[in-house]
Amino acid sequence: MPKRSSKPRPRDPNQLGKLIVALSLGEEDDAPAPAAADTGKDPAAVALGRKGGLKGGAARAKALSPAKRKAIAKKAAQKRWGK
């Protein structure tokens, strides 16, 4: 089940209210729009890029020393919480 509908929701509160009522009464379907079959991308290249992306973070963490990982984490925490 998708986390969000691919259909845009109306910004106007009145239209949004009407849509919610229509959905609750079953007058309108909230199913996501069907995905396009042809995205113009090579499926093999997409799979290969995803495969490399999944490997990247783990390989970087394995290559870093514990001290360097700690320094990176401290810097991130300072940026996040140091305001």
Image: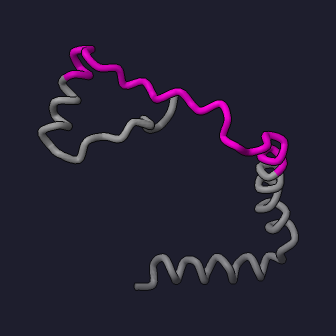
Q: Position of residue 15 (x, y in %)?
A: 17, 37
| Residue 14, quarter of picture | top left
The figure's colour scheme reads one colour
Q: Is 72 rendered above or below residue 17?
A: below
Of residues 27 and 67, the one nearer the viewer is 27
Q: Position of residue 8 (x, y in %)?
A: 36, 41
Task: In the displayed orientation, state which residue is furthest to the right.
Answer: 63
Compared across the picture, whether 79 is left or right of 71 comes to: left
Task: In the displayed orientation, state which residue is furthest to the top.
Answer: 26
Q: Position of residue 65 (x, y in %)?
A: 84, 77
Residue drawn at x 16%, y 34% as measured from the top left: 17
| Residue 13, quarter of picture | top left
The magenta stretch is: 22-48
Q: Main secondary structure of the magenta part?
A: loop
Q: Is 53 rendered above or below residue 80?
A: above
Of residues 7 and 65, the one nearer the viewer is 7
| Residue 52, quarter of picture | bottom right
Of residues 21 and 70, the one nearer the viewer is 21
Is residue 9 a member of the stretch shown in magenta?
A: no
Residue drawn at x 64%, y 76% as measured from the top left: 73
Residue drawn at x 20%, y 37% as measured from the top left: 16
Q: Is 27 rendered above or below residue 59?
A: above
Compared across the picture, whether 9 is left or right of 14 comes to: right
Q: Is 22 rendered above or below residue 78?
A: above
Q: Quadrant of the C terminus?
A: bottom left
Compared across the picture, whether 49 is left or right of 28 comes to: right
